Amino acid sequence: MNKRSLVSIDDLTTDEILKILDLAKEFEKNPSQLLLTGKIIATLFFEPSTRTRLSFESAINRLGGKIVGFSESGSSSVSKGETLHDTIRMVSNYSDLIVMRHPVEGSARFASEISSVPVINAGDGANQHPTQTLLDLYSIRKTQGTLDNLNIFLVGDLKYGRTVHSLMMAMSRWNTTFNFISPEELKMPDEFKLYLENLGLKYYEHSDFTEIISRADIIYMTRVQKERFSDPIEYEKVKNVYVLRNSILANTKPNMRILHPLPRVNEIHTDVDNNPKAYYFEQALNGVFTRQAILCTLLGIK
Ligand code: CP
């Protein structure tokens, strides 16, 4: 059994990332290929999800694989007190690969150490979301024609937003200029800034971006992660700090694109949706092709 897990984006070499993006491009041209016939994939979602779970399940169905699992832990024996350890030991007996989302940071690494089959981290708390990053890279390369030398604005909840943590780590490989835009309470954590500093890379922190928006190649908006706040009053203070509207996009580069991992709440006004620079719904579609490529790569197929 090939047991190659994907827990952090740093589990992949740059060459492996680029191969996954190339394979995703093939799947975009021809999404229905019976490459997972006879394979059973477990999708264990201990936290809510629309895109990650359903795009994985769509990817598996298009590849002819079968799915077991749950979309909320309340319907599993976790509700009777079963531990994550025992759950993973059981499910790895029933499947060829496990896709898992869990609220606890580090839970995916823990599961990968217990499991006898590969584990894909579909989001572990505020830590990492590597498959989102691969579809983000796919979307960036597709819209910009390159991953090299881009100016990326990461906007919103940089403290709890796992997608920006993984994306920042990945984009550090391509000479990216990083602009971090957040309220003081939701700044990029020191450990991720240190990650860039250790690589000798610069980043710039701002509380507003209207004055510098013309420099952006990608504006990556994020939702303030309500579920990670212990104090609801703290959430209320920061929830609407950034709202992207059409009116502030006038002076942006012609090829600039707006990404968002979704779901959005208020941070992108619906008046942006018909702007040709809005790319978030196409980005989510790219998740199917990218996840097809990830599944095949980890299972050693194609
Ligand atoms: N982007 C993302 O992870 O969305 P879901 O929470 O809907 O899976």
Image (spheres, rainbow, N blue to C red):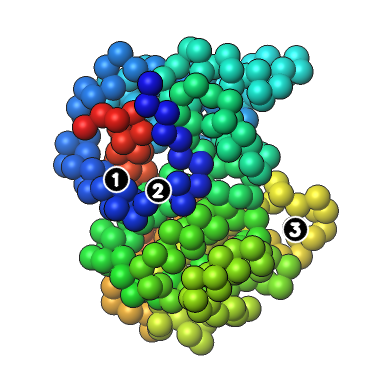
Disc ID at residue 65: none
Mark toward the start of the polypeptide (1 vs 2) = 2
Question: In the picture shown, does residue 9 fall above or below 155?
Answer: above
Q: Marks 1 and 2: CB-CB under 8 Å?
A: yes
Which callout, 3 or 1, points to the residue nearer the camera? 1
Question: In the picture shown, does residue 79 fall above or below 131?
Answer: above
Q: Quadrant of residue 275?
A: bottom left
Across and down, in percent, residue 291 comes to 36, 38
Which callout, 2 or 3, points to the residue nearer the camera? 2
Across and down, in percent, residue 227 comes to 70, 46
- Is residue 247 rendered to the left or right of residue 285? right
Q: Amino acid at mark 2?
A: Leu
Q: Amino acid at mark 1?
A: Ile
- Is residue 1 rendered to the left or right of residue 119? left
Q: Amino acid at mark 3?
A: Tyr
* Residue occupying image coordinates x 66% and y 67%: 190
Q: Marks 3 and 1: CB-CB under 8 Å?
A: no
Distance (Cα) linking label 2 and label 3: 34 Å
Distance (Cα) linking label 3 and label 1: 37 Å
Which residue, given by chain and number where applicable, does mark 1 sit on? 20
* Residue occupying image coordinates x 18% and y 42%: 26
Question: Could you say whether the residue bearing mark 3 is in a helix, strand or loop?
Answer: helix
Q: Which of the image's four quarters has the N terminus?
A: top left
Which residue, given by chain and number where applicable, does mark 2 sit on? 12
Q: Quadrant of residue 95?
A: top left
Q: Is residue 206 visible?
A: yes
Question: In the picture shown, does residue 250 fall above or below 163?
Answer: below
